[in-house]
């Protein structure tokens, strides 16, 4: 499904990705985790073609993404920050994205699930952050691509909308989709993820299930397992 080989990316003197290798199988929910500066965003944007690596290759469905830009049609992407045109109405934005990407029958159901009907005629610049995130989610889930990348999808959501999001993600997984998620909410990650990919200093430190991570770190719960990794890495850098 997704294969990444020897990926390098440097910004100035900062090596953000340092020979990263990763294989993600088809189907399932994979959480991409790591501290700030570990390379999560750069990895995601490299897969999307928004960042051009200095070295290495990325393959989707066995094909090198550098050979054609049309592979992006197989990915539904939820950005962490939704920078919508402030003067557009919600329904205008939804219709515009439908015109760009193709017809979908799912937008009406999603609008109802996130209770967005009262906001359809409101301008995006007048919406709260949480409501913008609901619009962001509708735009992402209303298509049917085999790969989904969700960058901090829980941001600003109320408890009811969070429950709706979890149900939607599970529904997409049940269709056989491959879903990549970044999140700082460990309880959310633990609840929905099949596997985690933990990045440190631009490389894969760990890939596997949460139970395997707890065994590796000899910790009783997920949060302490993550904390152990970060403490060990901090101690190593201090010694260096």
Image (cartoon, rainbow, N blue to C red):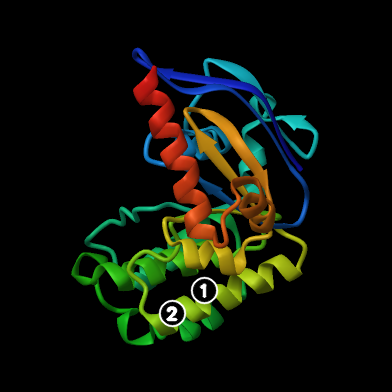
Q: Is residue 142 left or right of residue 115?
A: right
Q: Residue 165, image x and y in percent?
A: 51, 73
Picture quarter containing residue 20?
top right
* Secondary element at image label 2: helix
Q: Which of 74/225 is in front?
A: 225
Residue visible at 21% across and 64% down in the picture: 125
Residue visible at 43% across and 79% down in the picture: 161
Q: Which of 166/186 is in front?
A: 186
The residue that disc 2 covers is: 161
Q: Residue 123, image x and y in percent?
A: 24, 70
Q: Residues within 10 Å of mark 1 (few under 14, many from 20)?
A: many
Q: Is residue 175 left or right of residue 30?
A: right
Q: Is residue 199 left or right of residue 212?
A: left
The residue that disc 1 covers is: 165
Q: What separation in Å lies between label 1 and label 2 (alpha carbons)?
A: 6 Å
Q: Residue 8, image x and y in percent?
A: 54, 19
Q: Is residue 179 visible?
A: no
Residue visible at 50% across and 67% down in the picture: 188
Q: Which of 111/128 is in front?
A: 128
Q: Which mark is residue 222?
A: none
**158 above or below 82?**
below
Quadrant, the N terminus: top right
């Amino acid at each position: 499904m997704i294969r990444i080989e020897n990926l390098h990316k440097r910004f100035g003197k900062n090596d953000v990705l340092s020979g990263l290798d990763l294989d993600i199988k088809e189907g399932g929910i994979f959480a991409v985790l790591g501290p700030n500066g570990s390379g999560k965003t750069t990895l995601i944007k490299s897969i999307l073609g928004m960042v051009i690596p200095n070295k290495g290759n990325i393959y989707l469905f066995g094909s090198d993404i550098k050979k054609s830009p049309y592979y992006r049609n197989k990915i539904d992407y939820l950005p962490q920050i939704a920078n919508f045109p402030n003067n557009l109405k919600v329904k205008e934005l939804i219709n515009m994205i439908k015109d760009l990407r193709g017809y979908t029958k799912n937008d009406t159901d999603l609008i109802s699930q996130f209770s967005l009907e009262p906001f359809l005629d409101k301008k995006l610049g007048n919406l709260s952050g949480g409501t913008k995130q609901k619009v962001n989610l509708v735009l992402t889930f209303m298509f049917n691509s085999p790969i989904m990348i969700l960058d901090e999808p829980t941001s600003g959501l109320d408890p009811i909308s969070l429950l709706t999001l979890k149900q939607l993600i599970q529904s997409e997984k049940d269709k056989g989709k491959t879903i990549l998620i970044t999140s700082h909410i460990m309880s959310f990650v633990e609840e929905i993820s099949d596997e985690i990919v933990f990045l440190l200093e631009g490389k894969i430190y760990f890939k596997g299930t949460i139970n395997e991570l707890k065994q590796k770190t000899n910790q009783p719960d997920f949060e302490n397992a993550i904390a152990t990794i970060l403490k060990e890495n901090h101690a190593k850098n201090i010694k260096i």
